[in-house]
Image (tube, coloured by chain):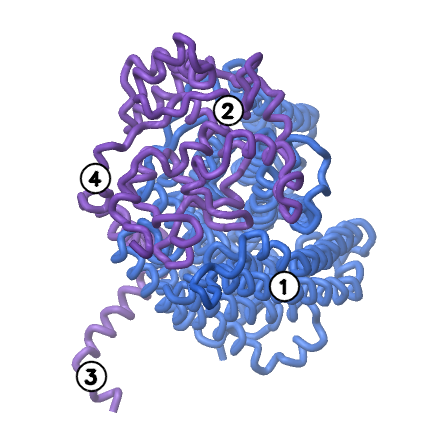
Chain colours: A purple, B blue
């Protein structure tokens, strides 16, 4: 029966067998075939993400990372925190109950690269900002088991002793502008000064940060040390802004029970 | 070196001199940055090769007619390096696993944290062990199935050593904190550019060798190797597009951000599984398994069907890593659908391999080498089934972010990739070094059982821990609040983490035995000239693979 059903296609099969037989003898034909077959999926799935407008929601209040926060983000990447912590709350009830409103695409719009992560050896951090105090974060990073005895997180005490390198920040912000983050010339020029200013409230530098990044910016001595701008300052500043670049998620997703 | 003519030795010197110069440039530009340290590593690496080439410069010219033999020296070196990387990479794996069970099991230093050494483990086993094994066996397979010598004397060395330079720069970078954070694509921009150069030479070498073949037909194992080379190149280039913060530092920022970056990363990430860890190793399987079993492939047509199925379907499935995330739902659905369809070509290859063994089960029982390959095919079938299953959205909601994913990856990486590689190495070593047999078949047998029990313990531990954690996360109390805190789940996973480290340690012990066995084979076993292992026009002298019945 199969033979009968397929008989109209016999010529097609024969043609396919013949061409394939020939292609098997030509390495370039195989090469082109492989590239063609392997390209389709990627093109269909990735290209539209750049062209379809509602892939990324509109969020007028979305702000960029300050230099100190960006420096903290670079430390987060350097230490491989993403290997154990995701930054992507899925649209599942238990995740919303545990971590807060599910993550929106716009919230990582300025994340080059994104840090959505793939594994939760530790909890999700997409909305960890302002969930704990600066002091808790610092103590936890210095010795996690001091605060959470069951924790398996490594200690990062050295961050509190290491001076933050700020000289390269203008270059880094400029590179980020090249790939699409809307930093202004002024923000790039003052990047090194703003990094220090954000952890030195009540100074002229701090006023500059508020002026360039908005009054809502966290300006605090994150690590509690006023003698030195440390890598701990940067990392805690970054952790405290996670989930706080825009309010659009909280505004569009009413909390349960409301 | 003795097989190189003086012109080729000079070329080798010039090339290593150029790399040396590039290393100096990197060191100068990156002064005070980890990139500068990398520059010095490159200088050291190139200097060693330069000295080796210089000392051989005045050696007499090779006398034999080189077209009359295969060029096996790069393969030999590649096999030994692959085993060294296996021990290093798996050793790192056991260490990071132990850190999760006993977090203080580290020197209190910046470089030894889980986040920094975990990529040393993943890159060490995937690129160091897997990559070197692929390059070495591809050199062997393409020569035998084409019945032609490698096209080039220096370029195989350039590919092999250049690739290892990339691996060394990658691994040392992670320890210093140089990473792009993109999983399995962590090395920074200069290492990425270097890999592209190496890869282009690899592709040209492969095509030129195929062009010389004395066999009209290109055997299917070569297609799998070719798809590995080609698609890995595409994936690598697209996913690593980035703008360096400055030419004097390692740091760069990826061209894409947020949701587009996530999709590109997992398009890359899952196809690293597909085209690095699957098609290349299927090439190994399609050559070494029929050779060892002395049986023709059960269905050549099926192997071709499976080939095009894998090449076409796999590329779609990356989005199943992003279920329920901010990625548009239609992309998630496409990824899930293609993941399920992918089961067909995957099982076609796994089934084809097992059916090939029909009539040779006695050999599987007696020969641990063939048993490595058989169990690898079984694990390939199992983990592809598990993969398709986990890509279903509802299953993924439970398994994602948990150890179940880790267990799945290791079922594939230990059970399939590593076992087929060890089997191929045991089959290949006596042939390459012209030895009668392996040093000790008993050790091969020991290795087999260590590897199998290690894998099974590992996978079961991760299933338990992953499913337990996934269920605890979503359990509610009767009053409608979450029943368990995150730290509750950590306590629950502790015993499984110990079991996982133990399973990994067994597997590592097997790899150490393999290294010892291969080294002793090279040093102790008497020589034995094989029949008919040379390039020829005649099919009778060296059939590419056992002929069909």
Estimate the spatial distance between the alpha carbons at disc 2 and disc 1, rounded to whole Å.
Answer: 40 Å
- Name the residue at the right extreme: B524
Indicate the chain on which mark 3 is placed: A
Pointer 3: what residue? A7
Q: Looking at the image, is B269 positioned above or below residue B52?
A: below
Q: In this view, does B452 lie to the left or right of B528?
A: left
- Marks 4 and 3 on same chain: yes
Q: Where is residue B51 in the image (x, y as percent from the top left)?
A: 67, 24
Q: Mark 4 or mark 2, which is nearer the start of the sequence? A: 4
Give residue A58's mark: 4
- Local SS, label 3: helix
Pointer 2: what residue? A222
Estimate the spatial distance between the alpha carbons at disc 4 and disc 3, rounded to whole Å.
Answer: 55 Å
Estimate the spatial distance between the alpha carbons at disc 1 and disc 3, rounded to whole Å.
Answer: 52 Å
Which marked residue is nearer to the observer: mark 4 or mark 3? 4
Q: Looking at the image, is B106 positioned above or below residue B143?
A: above
């Amino acid at each position: 029966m199969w033979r009968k059903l397929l008989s109209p296609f016999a010529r097609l099969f024969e043609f396919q067998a013949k061409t394939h037989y020939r292609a098997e003898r030509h390495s370039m034909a195989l090469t082109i075939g492989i590239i063609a077959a392997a390209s389709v999926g990627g093109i269909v799935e990735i290209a539209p993400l750049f062209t379809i407008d509602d892939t990324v929601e509109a969020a007028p209040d979305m702000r960029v990372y300050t230099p100190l926060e960006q420096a903290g983000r670079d430390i987060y990447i350097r230490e491989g925190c993403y290997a154990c912590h995701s930054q992507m709350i899925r649209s599942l009830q238990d995740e919303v109950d545990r971590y807060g409103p599910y993550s929106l695409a716009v919230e990582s719009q300025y994340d080059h690269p994104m840090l959505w992560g793939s594994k939760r050896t530790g909890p999700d951090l997409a909305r960890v900002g302002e969930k704990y105090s600066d002091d808790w974060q610092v103590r936890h990073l210095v010795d996690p088991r001091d605060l959470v005895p069951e924790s398996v997180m490594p200690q990062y005490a050295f961050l509190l002793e290491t001076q933050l390198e700020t000289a390269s920040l203008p270059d880094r912000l400029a590179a980020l502008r090249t790939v699409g983050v809307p930093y202004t010339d002024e923000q790039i020029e003052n990047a090194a000064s703003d990094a220090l200013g954000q952890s030195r409230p009540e100074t002229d530098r701090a006023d500059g940060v508020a002026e360039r990044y908005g009054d809502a910016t966290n300006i605090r001595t994150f690590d509690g040390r006023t003698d030195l701008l440390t890598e701990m300052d940067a990392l805690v500043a970054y952790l405290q802004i996670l989930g706080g670049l825009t309010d659009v998620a909280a505004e569009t997703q009413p909390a349960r029970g409301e | 070196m003795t097989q190189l003519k003086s012109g080729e030795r000079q070329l080798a010197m010039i090339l290593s001199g150029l790399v040396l110069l590039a290393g100096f440039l990197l060191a100068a530009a990156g002064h005070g940055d980890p990139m500068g340290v990398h520059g010095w590593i490159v200088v050291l690496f190139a200097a060693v090769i330069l000295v080796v080439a210089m000392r051989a410069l005045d050696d007499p010219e090779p006398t034999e007619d080189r077209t009359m033999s295969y060029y096996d020296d790069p393969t030999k070196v590649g096999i030994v390096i692959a085993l060294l990387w296996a021990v290093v990479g798996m050793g790192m794996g056991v260490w990071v696993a132990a850190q999760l069970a006993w977090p203080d099991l580290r020197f209190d230093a910046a470089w030894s944290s889980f986040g920094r050494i975990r990529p040393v483990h993943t890159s060490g086993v995937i690129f160091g062990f897997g990559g070197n094994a692929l390059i070495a066996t591809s050199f062997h397979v393409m020569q035998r199935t084409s019945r032609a010598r490698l096209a080039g004397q220096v370029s195989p060395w350039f590919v092999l050593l250049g690739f290892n330079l990339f691996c060394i720069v990658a691994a040392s970078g992670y320890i210093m904190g140089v990473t792009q954070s993109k999983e399995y694509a962590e090395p920074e921009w200069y290492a990425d550019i270097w890999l592209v150069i190496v890869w282009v030479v690899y592709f040209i070498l492969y095509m030129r060798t195929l062009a010389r073949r004395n066999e009209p037909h290109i055997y299917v194992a070569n297609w799998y190797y070719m798809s590995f080379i080609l698609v890995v190149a595409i994936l690598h280039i697209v996913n690593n597009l980035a703008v360096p913060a400055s030419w004097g530092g390692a740091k760069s920022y990826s061209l894409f951000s947020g949701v587009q970056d996530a999709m590109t990363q997992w398009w890359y990430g899952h196809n690293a599984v597909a085209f690095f860890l699957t098609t290349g190793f299927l090439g190994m399987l399609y050559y070494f398994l029929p050779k060892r079993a002395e049986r023709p492939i059960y269905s050549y047509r099926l192997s071709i069907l499976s080939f095009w199925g894998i090449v076409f379907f796999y590329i779609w499935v990356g989005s199943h890593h992003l279920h329920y995330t901010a990625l548009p739902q239609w992309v998630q659905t496409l990824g899930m659908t293609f993941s399920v369809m992918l089961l067909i070509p995957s099982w076609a290859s796994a089934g084809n391999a097992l059916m090939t063994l029909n009539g040779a089960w006695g050999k599987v029982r007696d020969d641990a080498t063939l048993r490595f390959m058989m169990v690898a095919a079984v694990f390939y079938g199992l983990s592809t089934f598990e993969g398709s299953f986990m890509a279903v959205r509802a299953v993924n909601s439970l398994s994602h972010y948990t150890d179940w994913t880790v267990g799945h990856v290791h079922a594939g990486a230990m059970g399939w990739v590593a076992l087929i590689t060890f089997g191929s190495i045991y089959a290949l070593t006596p042939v390459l070094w012209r030895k009668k047999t392996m040093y000790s078949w008993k050790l091969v047998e020991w290795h087999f059982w260590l590897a199998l029990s290690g894998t099974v313990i590992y996978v079961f531990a991760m299933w338990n821990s992953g499913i337990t954690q996934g269920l605890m996360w979503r359990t509610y109390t009767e009053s409608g609040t979450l029943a368990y805190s995150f730290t509750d789940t950590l306590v629950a996973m502790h015993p499984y983490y110990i079991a996982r480290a133990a399973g990994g340690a067994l597997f590592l012990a097997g790899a150490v035995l393999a290294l010892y066995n291969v080294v002793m084979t090279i040093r102790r076993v008497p020589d034995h000239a094989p029949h008919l292992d040379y390039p020829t026009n005649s099919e009778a002298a060296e059939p590419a693979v056992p002929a069909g019945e």
